[in-house]
Image (cartoon, rainbow, N blue to C red):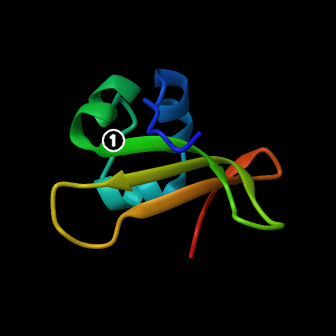
Amino acid sequence: MNKPQEISIAEWKEIMQMPVIRESWGLEEDETPEEFADMVYGVKFHFAVGGPGYVGDLYILHGDALGEPFVLIREGGRLALVG
């Protein structure tokens, strides 16, 4: 399925716990997943590499400034930054 999916609140909560994400967005301890979702362009795909390789969730996150987006996948059940 290559259609974009909405990121759930539970997934936003998981994403915003990653140190690189917290630092990049300057997140405070009391910010909620709903607040974070309102400040980020984010989408999820059910992704399958066209050959042997990764099959699973792929998240693309982008802030309000042009630049490279954050791309996340799951490795061993945990979110990991690609690249």
- Indicate the position of residue 30 as horizontal and vertical percent values: 36, 29
As drawn, 81 above or below 63: below
Query: Which amino acid, mark 1?
Result: Glu
- Side of 52 where 82 appears, left or right: left
Q: Residue at x 46, y 33 (%)?
A: 5
- Indicate the position of residue 40 as horizontal and vertical percent values: 28, 44
As drawn, 28 above or below 63: above
Residue density around tag 1, few if under 14, some if 14–19, many if 20 or more, within 10 Å:
few
Q: Nearer the viewer, residue 16 or 77?
A: 77
- Indicate the position of residue 44 as horizontal and vertical percent values: 49, 41
Q: Nearer the viewer, residue 83 or 57?
A: 57
Q: Quadrant of the N terminus?
A: top right
Figure quadrant of residue 43:
top left
Q: Nearer the viewer, residue 14 or 75?
A: 75
Residue topped by disc 1 = 28
Q: Residue at x 78, y 44 (%)?
A: 77
- Side of 46 where 12 appears, left or right: left
Q: Secondary structure at mark 1?
A: loop
Residue occupying the far bottom of the picture: 83
The reply to whether residue 16 is visible in this rendering is no
As drawn, 44 above or below 34: below
As drawn, 64 above or below 16: below
Figure quadrant of residue 41:
top left
Q: Quadrant of the C terminus?
A: bottom right
Q: Residue at x 63, y 54 (%)?
A: 73
